Image: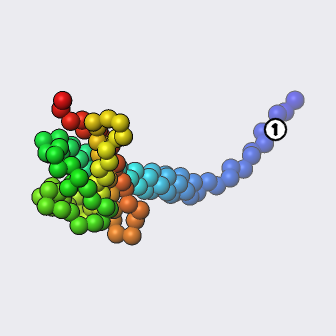
Amino acid sequence: MIAHRFRIPRRRQAGIALLEALVAVVLLGVGLLGIVGLQARSYSALADTSMRAEATMAADKLLGAMAADQANLGSYAMTMRGTPGSSLGPWYEETRRQIPNAGIGVEVAPVAGTTRTRVTITIAWARKANTAANQHVITSYLATAT
């Protein structure tokens, strides 16, 4: 019996390596774009965190000054974007230097039936023009010494 060997013609695969290289380049490009986007969001979050830390330190500083000057607590009150009084002026200017274009409001309200006063400090800022404002609100109670 004679075995016949059949030759199966090979198909040409020219260009496959080039196609694989192009797919690899596209995938690499998408990955790099993702990394750039992640870095931009990371930078944005870091900037907001920095402003929030400044707002916290500013509020703490004001609360310390108010605790030392409890006889004049009412003079520290100010509506959001209002004009600060003489007691609040230096702190207000310093805070606006640390947080540019910050909106600042200070609410001072005695707590009925107690010797405590509720102080609510609101500091708002927008990191970029035409974006939603971030806001940091701190509420604290000051009690008179007896």
Spot occupied by residue 16 in the image (x, y as percentages of width and height): 57, 54
22 and 36: which is toward the camera: 36
Is 51 positioned to the left or the right of 16 in the image? left
State left or right for residue 16 relative to residue 63. right
- Which one is nearer the viewer's eye here, 131 or 135? 135
Residue 114: x and y in percent read 32, 35
Using the rendered image of the protein, determine whether residue 12 is visible from the camera's viewpoint: yes
Query: Within 10 angstroms of label 1, few (less than 14), some, or many (20 or more) residues?
Result: few
Numbered disc 1: secondary structure? loop
Residue at image coords 22%, 58%: 99
The quarter of the rendered structure image containing the N terminus is top right
Q: Amino acid at mark 1?
A: His
At x 68% / y 52%, what residue is drawn? 11
Residue 70 quadrant: top left
Q: In the image, residue 25 lies at what x, y percent?
A: 46, 55
Q: Which residue is mark 1?
A: 4
Say how the picture is coloured: rainbow
In the foreground, 107 or 22: 107
- Residue that sits furthest to the bottom in the current view: 130
Question: Residue, x 84% and y 33% (percent of image)?
Answer: 2
Farthest residue toward the right? 1
The reply to whether residue 32 is in sight is no
Residue drawn at (18%, 32%), measured in percent from left and top? 145
Position of residue 100 measured from the top left corner of the image (x, y, whole percent) = 23, 63
